[in-house]
Amino acid sequence: MSNPVSAVAGPVISLGFGVVRLPVGLLAQVTGNGGNKEWGPVLAVDAVEGGVRQVLGSLLGDPGLAAQGDVTDARVAQRTEAAERDQAAQARREVADDRLAQRRERDQEARRKAREAEQQQHQRLEAEKQRREQQERQREQERKQAAQRDEQRAQEVADSHAHEARRARVEAESEAVEAERKAAAAKAEALDVANAKEKAKNARKR
């Protein structure tokens, strides 16, 4: 004859844990885990229910109730293992996503540094170009100034030579005039002497 307690134990357990599942189901809906049989609190309730069925089945000598507990426990173990696999896969995905994000960040940083280096190189080249142009303008200005000084010195030398030539020409002309004057005076003196001799000769003839 079947045990009357055992006959009602299964439905009572199902009813009791059905009541327990109500707040757990509401919490699952609120947290976005509605319908997720691998969610931790759901697994916990099922595991407790399976354990209760196993214990009561053993105490009441009801192998069917105990078998129900074993099946529930096995299903909980399978779902727990699946949840752990999902969590491990999710963890690997998160690690992969983190690594991908880090690699993208490093790539972006490398590109940023490359752009900065290129910009700095361009600025250095532009500054060097401007410096060379400034030096060339300075050298050109110095060449022009040197040419002007040389031209000025050459003009001064030419002016000095011209002045010296004019002075020498004036002196030569003065010396020539003086020589002509002396020659004229000597000629006049010679004429005077000749006239005096002629007069003296004429006077002796008388």
Image: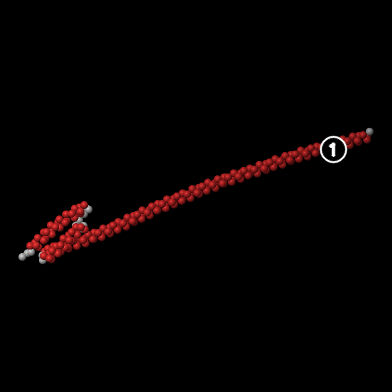
Q: Residue furthest left?
A: 1
Classify residue 9 as left or right of residue 141: left
Residue that badge 1 annotates:
190
Q: x, y percentage for residue 57?
A: 12, 64
**Residue 6 visible from this viewpoint:** yes
Display colour scheme: secondary structure
| Residue drawn where x is 76% and y is 38% of the image | 177
| Residue drawn where x is 78% and y is 39% of the image | 179
Between 134 and 96, the one lying in front of the other is 96
Q: x, y percentage for residue 38?
A: 20, 58
* Quarter of the rendering containing residue 19: bottom left
**What secondary structure is found at the residue carrying circle 1?**
helix
Classify residue 146 as left or right of residue 193: left
Q: Residue furthest right?
A: 206
> Is 140 drawn above or below residue 54 in the view shown?
above
Q: x, y percentage for residue 158?
A: 65, 43
- For the C terminus, the image quarter is top right
